[in-house]
Image (cartoon, grey):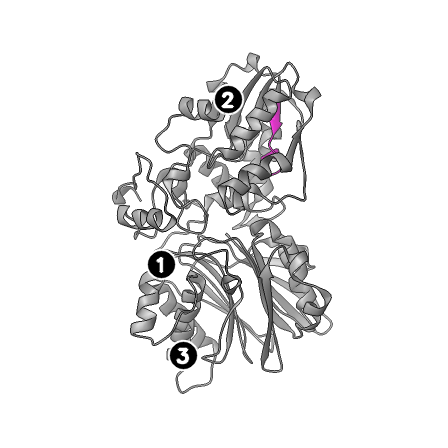
């Protein structure tokens, strides 16, 4: 999971991209990068770290130009150890392209081999994003061979990319002396939206992973990029768009975006993230009422921050007291997207501290957005007990995560998932809770459809094991497991293809 942004401006865009990346920092804290275009040259700076640490005044001065792209990285495919795999990526042919990508290709190994054997292109990292860039570059060269580059050639190239690439991808590219190109995978798994700002010098355009990057930078949200759609914005400010995917595919955005990743002040595919989490809390409240004795609960507390709307709505619906029992240190990153289990575990205690008076002698219902590895949940339950809680119950606004995610979330092996091979009672014992309630998947998806009835289905593979791209089987998951050197836990399964 990463955050990407692209700007076609009427003046220097380096500060604008920097500010937008700050607004997307929650989507990736491993590395950051910006590439701008100026006088037929690209200027680039990228490094490990947070946006505020990567870019100094001297770096910003070295990024002139009226167009550019940027990314904050959360590593999935490839290695987080190498800065070479930070984005943007660059290729010099055809035309010169800088490129940022959010998502994960599922057939990148096959594509890499095909690029070398047939397209005569060399890939210098283990990043699937570099593979996707070279597929796009090759198809752009084929489409524009012998002619000046225009929007039709770009659309032809994107159609070819859709035929070759499988998985999740939202892409923004800057083509030298031409303009910005953006496109989204045919299923619309990863988000991408378009913004506009009308200035005295003309119209400026911005593309970003979340609407908060647009509105926080003074742009108006125009719309989301449709699944399979490609958008072209030339240096002259001319805008064009075309559907480039095969017809008949249903939009299936990643449900985990609404649960955890996106900021609550974003709107994604017509759904307010904040409103979605309120609705999740209502459905979860009904499940809690059926599962636990409400008379045993004294207080409802959120695990800050992303579960706060769900916890507030749950407490209101059940008529229970709502309290803030944990204080968050905002200078520690999001533990779920930190690389390495040891780092995550250590960061939980650094990130959260308990207010003893809110716990002492009470039966507490803790509400979190999800439970993935269980490390954070176990530490939090221990903290609640140490603060004097009498009993500690736990509720998750998302269903049990039982399957690997292969579309850009760093949980690719079932051995890392606490719910694999365990029922709710067993999971409760593992995290030390007196009781555990999970949201039902049907209710989670319905909470989103309530806000946008046009969204009929979602990419929910980490909950149900159904992989919508149709290319994930046991052999693929075994390859992922072996690549990480982790043992397979019993109970690993992929849902039958006919249920996809």
Q: How far apart, in angstroms, are the residues tagged by discs 2 and 3?
A: 58 Å
Residue 244 at x, y percent in the picture = 40, 66
**Left or right of residue 43, residue 135 in this image:** left
Q: Secondary structure at mark 3?
A: helix
Q: Secondary structure at mark 1?
A: loop
Residue 66, placed above or below residue 447: below
Q: How far apart, in angstroms, are the residues tagged by discs 2 and 1?
A: 40 Å
The residue at which mark 3 appears reads as 141
Which residue reaches farthest top? 295
Q: Nearer the viewer, mark 2 or mark 1?
A: 2
The residue at which mark 1 appears reads as 166
Q: What residue is drawn where x is 39% and y is 69%? A: 135
Residue 149 appears in the figure: yes
Q: Looking at the image, is mark 2 or mark 3 earlier in the sequence?
A: 3
Residue 185, placed above or below residue 495: below
Please tell me which residue lies in front, 273 or 67.
67
């Amino acid at each position: 999971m990463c955050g990407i942004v692209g700007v076609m401006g009427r003046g220097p865009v380096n500060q604008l991209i920097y500010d937008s990346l700050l607004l997307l920092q929650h989507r990736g804290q491993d590395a950051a990068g910006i590439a701008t275009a100026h006088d037929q040259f690209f200027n680039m700076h990228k490094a490990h770290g947070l946006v505020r640490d990567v870019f100094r005044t001297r770096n910003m001065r070295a990024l002139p130009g009226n167009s550019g792209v940027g990314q904050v990285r959360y590593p999935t495919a490839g290695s987080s150890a190498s800065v070479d795999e930070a984005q943007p990526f660059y290729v010099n042919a055809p035309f010169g392209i800088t490129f940022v990508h959010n998502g994960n290709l599922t057939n990148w190994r096959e594509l890499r081999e095909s690029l070398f054997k047939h397209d005569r292109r060399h890939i210098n990292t283990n990043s699937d994003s570099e593979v996707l860039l070279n597929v796009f570059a090759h198809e752009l060269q084929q489409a524009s061979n012998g002619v000046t580059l225009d929007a039709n050639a770009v659309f032809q190239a994107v159609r070819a990319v859709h035929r070759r690439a499988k998985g999740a991808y939202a892409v923004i590219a800057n083509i030298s002396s031409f303009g910005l190109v953006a496109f989204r995978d045919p299923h619309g798994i990863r988000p991408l939206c378009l913004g506009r700002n009308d200035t005295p010098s003309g119209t400026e355009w911005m593309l970003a992973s979340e609407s908060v990057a647009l509105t926080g930078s003074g742009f108006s949200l125009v719309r989301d990029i449709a699944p399979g759609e490609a958008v072209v914005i030339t240096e002259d400010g001319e805008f064009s768009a075309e559907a480039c995917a095969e017809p008949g595919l249903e939009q299936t955005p990643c449900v985990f975006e609404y649960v955890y990743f996106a900021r609550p002040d974003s709107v994604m595919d017509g759904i307010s993230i904040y409103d979605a989490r309120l609705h999740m809390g209502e459905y979860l409240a009904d499940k809690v009422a059926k599962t636990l004795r409400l008379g045993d609960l004294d207080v409802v507390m959120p695990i800050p921050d992303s579960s706060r709307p769900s916890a507030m709505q749950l407490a209101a619906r059940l008529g229970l007291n709502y309290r803030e029992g944990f204080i968050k240190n905002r200078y520690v990153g999001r533990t779920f997207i930190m690389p390495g289990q040891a780092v995550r575990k250590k960061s939980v205690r650094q990130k959260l501290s308990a207010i003893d008076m809110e716990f002492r002698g009470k039966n507490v219902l803790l509400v979190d957005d999800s439970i993935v590895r269980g490390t954070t949940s176990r530490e939090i339950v221990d903290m609640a007990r140490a603060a004097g809680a009498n009993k500690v119950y736990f509720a998750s606004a998302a269903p049990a995560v039982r399957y690997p995610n292969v579309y850009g979330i760093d949980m690719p092996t079932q051995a890392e998932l606490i719910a694999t091979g365990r029922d709710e009672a067993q999971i409760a014992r593992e995290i030390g809770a007196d009781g555990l309630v999970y949201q039902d998947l049907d209710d989670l998806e319905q909470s989103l459809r309530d806000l946008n009835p046009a969204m009929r289905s979602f990419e929910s593979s980490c909950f149900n094991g159904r992989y919508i791209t149709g290319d994930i089987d046991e052999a693929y998951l075994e390859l992922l497991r072996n690549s990480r050197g982790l043992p397979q836990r019993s109970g690993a399964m992929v849902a039958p293809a006919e249920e996809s």
